[in-house]
Image (tube, rainbow, N blue to C red):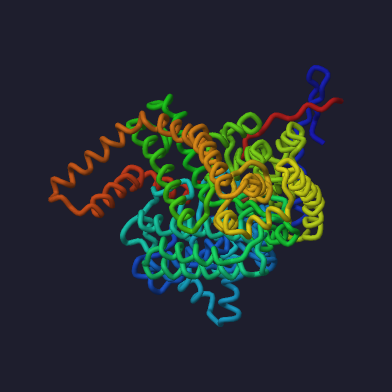
Amino acid sequence: MGEPKNIDGLTELDIEAELARFEAEERAKLGLETAPKEHWVDEMTTPNFTASQRKKTTLLVGGLTLAQDFLIEGALKGIGYEVRALTEADETALRFGKEYGNRGQCNPTYFTVGNLVKELCRLRDQEGLTSEEVVERYAFLTAGACGPCRFGMYVTEYRKALRDAGFDGFRVLLFQQTGGFKQATGEELGLVLNPNFFITVGKAIFTGDVINLMGYRLRPYEVEPGSVDAAIEAVKKDVYESLQNGKSVYAALWRGRKRLEAVKIDRMKAKPKVAVIGEFWAMTTEGDGNYHLQRFLEQEGAEVGIQVLAATLLYNLWEFRHDTTARLELRGADQSKFGLAGSDAGLTLGGLYFAELALRMWWQSYAKILGLTGFVLPDMDEVARAGHSHYNVELRGGEGHLEVAKLILNVVKQKAHMTVSVKPFGCMPSSGVSDGVQSVITELYPEAIFCPVETSGDGAVNFYSRVQMYLFKARQRAREEFDKTLADEGVTEAQLRAFLESPAGKRFASNLRVPPHVSAGTTTDLIREIAPYAKANGALGRAKVRATVTAKSAKKWVEKDGKRWLTFGREMSPYLPAIARFVGKELAEQVEQKAPSVTKAWTRVFDRATKLSAEEEAQVRAAEIAAATAPIPTEKKKPQGLPVVA
Ligand code: SF4
């Protein structure tokens, strides 16, 4: 033992010295002192993928929903890449991830990294390619971020596992999640991250979102089992081919609308609505990574409310806008990468509002064409307000404040009977932080049926039984709500069924129609909507009901949506002059250069707005070089010893 020091009656033990002594003894025992030290160094920070290799290289993609991975494959093929979507990550992928990954990773890391290694091993062991051929002919495309959770380490983890699995040098190509359109680029690069690339990927992601939502909306009420899945598969295939062949996605969605409309459904069923929230990958995947949670819930009789990828992009925009607004105060004092010194902050903020507006309109255009009515993308300011009082919005990583806010809004706005929060084993932000806060939320909102579940990959029975336990309560609540609504409206189920089958009720029975939201259950909303019509006396009576409903809806729109758009416009308006100046300057320059076509003009304005400046490009390169050449710290700062009571 080291010599204890006596300070004011407390004996201070030099723990660092004790630990160092213990470590030295153990190292000597194990013979580690003589073994050469080999540190892991990521040597592949700039993977070599050139334009000339594009035709000979297959890009592997994966990690989103089945629909989105599939559609991204079609979309990227349409702009000249050879692409193949990986199959959904399963148990075998988890085993590969655990075998070749670092210890102590979170579950999504194991699943996603393992899924890539699994596929490369399949190419080698079943298709007979050598490891060198796999490395030469394939590359993996994924999103990256700077953290702060393990997401920031994914790319390094991929490279480490690939090296250990025998695929040293395999190319993992990265686009920065937080970089948006501003990515390092260059014509000589194999992967050209230009606006066309992002618009193409956006088409695949957004159409995937709306197709998924339609599937989850209709499947619980289908009359013929499997009919919705068959229609959804046909829609996906049609959209895929349109993306691949450069045809109109809108036309494909319109044909999809007709297919979905033709499926027979019965909405007069008291089904619990279950919102699935949690960590991004765990709540999004549809495979073993969350034990096929969405399908399990449907089999158990629930209607599932999924999260859409567009909401994650809106959150990223909100983060950028929030941080830029906070940085306005700092200006010259803030010399960091995103500092505003010397930049046009008004243009940045205006651009962010404009980007949000464009994203919402783009997404809704797909939704409306496919027939997805009544779905509103979340208002991120409202989400932030709801979450902030319990989870500081400055805390980032994982889902940040979103998980907490979603639970609150689900309860307060009666969006679902039950909320399942999926937490991957080992997740820092979700299990480590949000879960602690959620216990306070459930105390404040005792009516919430909240089921947090952890996915470790090997505990399916426990997982299912926990979900079933909560689902029992949700089912009861849905049934009570159904019976109470019938009683309140003074109608019977048989009466409403008869009305839906009558010519007057036909339009309410349409698959694409969604009743106005009042309560958690879709069916109870439908009862509220059609009961007045079913009770009305003849055509004149129904016309009176219709007039009253139209007036009420218009009032509600003005009070709610109109107000929201007004606020949005008011917030955006101070930045409009900056946008107008920018666009005006660009257009004036172009007119001077012989007035190009409208498409060319728009492309150039867009390009200028989104491309990295030479200075930013240099910053990215410098940061990459600094990260790659940073010395590995050898000396630790010695902390003070802890006081120990003698
Ligand atoms: S949010 Fe959690 S599960 Fe997801 S990458 Fe970060 S640490 Fe892993």
Residue 616, located in which quarter of the rendered image? top left
In the image, residue 220 sits, relative to residue 641, either above or below, namely below
Quarter residue 162 falls in = bottom right
Judge from the rendering whether residue 14 lies leftward or rightward of residue 646; answer left or right. Answer: left
Rendered location of residue 482, percent (x, y): 74, 47
Q: Quadrant of the C terminus?
A: top right
Instruction: Report the residue at 52% width, 46% height from top.
Output: 146
Residue 56 image position (x, y, % from top left): 40, 74
Quadrant in which residue 222 is drawn: bottom right
Nearer the observer, 408 or 583:
408
Res. 463 in view: yes
Q: Is residue 39 visible?
A: no
Q: Is residue 371 left or right of residue 419?
A: left
Residue 487 percent coordinates (x, y): 76, 43
Q: Is residue 45 above or below residue 558?
A: below
Q: Position of residue 81 (x, y in %)?
A: 40, 68
Q: Is residue 533 above or below residue 191?
A: above
Quick one: 144 or 289, which is closer to the camera?
289
